[in-house]
Amino acid sequence: MLPVQKTKHMPPPLPLISPSKPVGHPHRRLFWLLLMLIYTAATVLRLASTPPSVEDVDDPLKAHMAMKEEPLEVRQENVPPLLISCSSLINGQWKSRVSPSLEIGVIRNKSEEGGLLCCDRTQYRTDVCYARGDVRMMHRSPPSIIVYDHSKSIDRMEEKIRPYTRKWETTIMRTINEVSMRKVPPTNTTSARDAPCEVWHESPGVVFSTGGYTGNVYHEFNDGLIPLYLTTERFKGDIVFVVLEYHPWWLTKYGGIVRRLSKYPVIDFAKDRRVHCFREVIVGLNIHGELMIDPSLMPNGKSMKDFQTLIGEGIGRQNQLKSIVTYHHKRKPKLAIFIRNRSRVILNLKDLVRLCERIGFEVQLLNPKKNTPLSEIYNALQTADVMMGVHGAAMTHLLFMRPSTVFIQIVPLGLAWAADTYYGEPARRLGLKYEEYRVDPGESSLLRKYGRHDPVIVNPVAITKKGWSETKRVYLEGQNVKVNLRRFNKILVRVRSHVCRSSGLKCL
């Protein structure tokens, strides 16, 4: 075979055969045919031996051809952007890769010049939204948060959210102010020039409501303070609180706790009419359950015990050293009893107190009012070995008890499920010894009111199935109790024995 020609120039053109002239001898015709075949073979071999250019590789019809082996080079600009779920952004889990989810909506990570807005609506108890970029918060009706997208994107989106953690209760949620959140390009009719920044925040912001059931201590902790802690603790104080339905008394009461979660003044969204600008904003709060924090859902593994530590730091531990010293001395175990004045009243309270004292307890009665300093209740329970009361919001103060102490809950007729769900189970999770005293029909004032054979007495489940409003009317607001002292005596003896045995206290 003839050697392949490797020069780049084309071979000289072949002489054309004119059809109008006769072609001479047949051997000459065969010679020209052979020459054309040799030329074609040479051309094919030359193409096969020439490495393809970069442009050739991009052509799918040429990419299969042999090419010189070179080390592979990673081109970062070709790597697709990370997929980050909205919940991961809310929780600060920036580096985690997640699978796409239709419920949450997976968004693509964008440059700082782009605006970002998403909402996690997958939770039963709460919705939480997240905005990043040029975020401007302004007092309007409804309150508005606008994210200006300075990228080339012309996409617009809008979300509406009521930032309160009882999403399933439609009646109470209607009382919570709705926040309008929009992502728009700055060329929109409502441009950045129409909302110039009046206050610039380097730190992120979180928007939440202190409306709803705020005023009830259980809901103040369960729906407010605990969700606020588990949503914002990771910022270590470097976050701005923006409050809807703001109540000055709320900050007066819980200011010590709030100031340990944020080092900045609280913003009243309704009254502060300035345009506040942020780089990052969370609207709404996460919630894990009744008086609980699930460490597995926390970015840093924090738990309810960490929240209890925060309570102690925020409310004040004026008597902490004194309580520890006193706790190890010879003394009677201390029993703190929460008393009620309007419903679920202990009708034979004096007799019950005398029984407790006769068994060997030092008794302290607690009757907190709205203006009672939280530190007063905290210090009383920090020095107590046992906390006791009839089911109600005041039982939330079990959060102030020391580990391994005792919580006795007196459960009125028809309230067994609520008592265990809202206070019994949380107490066990906190490591308290939980004792439950269920009231018999004969100990309830409902027996005289409805009669022994009424469904209210014999079938409380049927009544509670009618809904919370009926449960509240019959069993919460319409019932008092008269404790059977002989039956209650057994619980008190057992509890005193536990305290004296397990705590190292030398009981008198």
Image (spheres, helix red, strand yellow):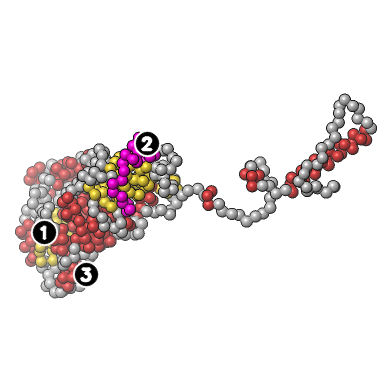
Q: CA distance from mark 1 to mark 3?
A: 25 Å
Q: Residue 216 appears at what percent x and percent y?
A: 17, 49
Range of the magenta residues? Answer: 183-204
- Tell which circle, 1 or 3, labels the residue nearer the N-terminal end: 1
- Residue at the spot x=83%, y=38% of the render? 36
Q: Residue at x 18, y 41 (%)?
A: 469
Q: Residue at x 55, y 52 (%)?
A: 75
Q: Closest to the observer: 449 or 48?
A: 48
Q: Residue furthest left?
A: 350
Dot 2: what SS?
loop
Return the residue at label 3. 502
Which amino acid, mark 2?
Asn
Q: Mark yes or no: residue 328 visible.
A: yes
Judge whether residue 442 is colored magenta: no
Which-is-in-front pick, marks 1 and 3? Answer: 1
The residue pinned by badge 1 equals 366
Residue 211: x and y in percent read: 21, 45
Disc 2: which residue: 188
Quarter that holds the C terminus: bottom left
Say what secondary structure mark 1 lies in: strand
Q: Main secondary structure of the magenta part?
A: loop
> Distance from label 2 to label 1 (Cα)?
59 Å
- Kind of residue indicated by mark 3: Ser
Q: Is residue 202 magenta?
A: yes
| Crowd tier of the residue under label 2, counting other residues whose Cα lies within 10 Å: few below 14, some 14–19, many 20 or above | few
Camera-side residue of 264 and 213:
264
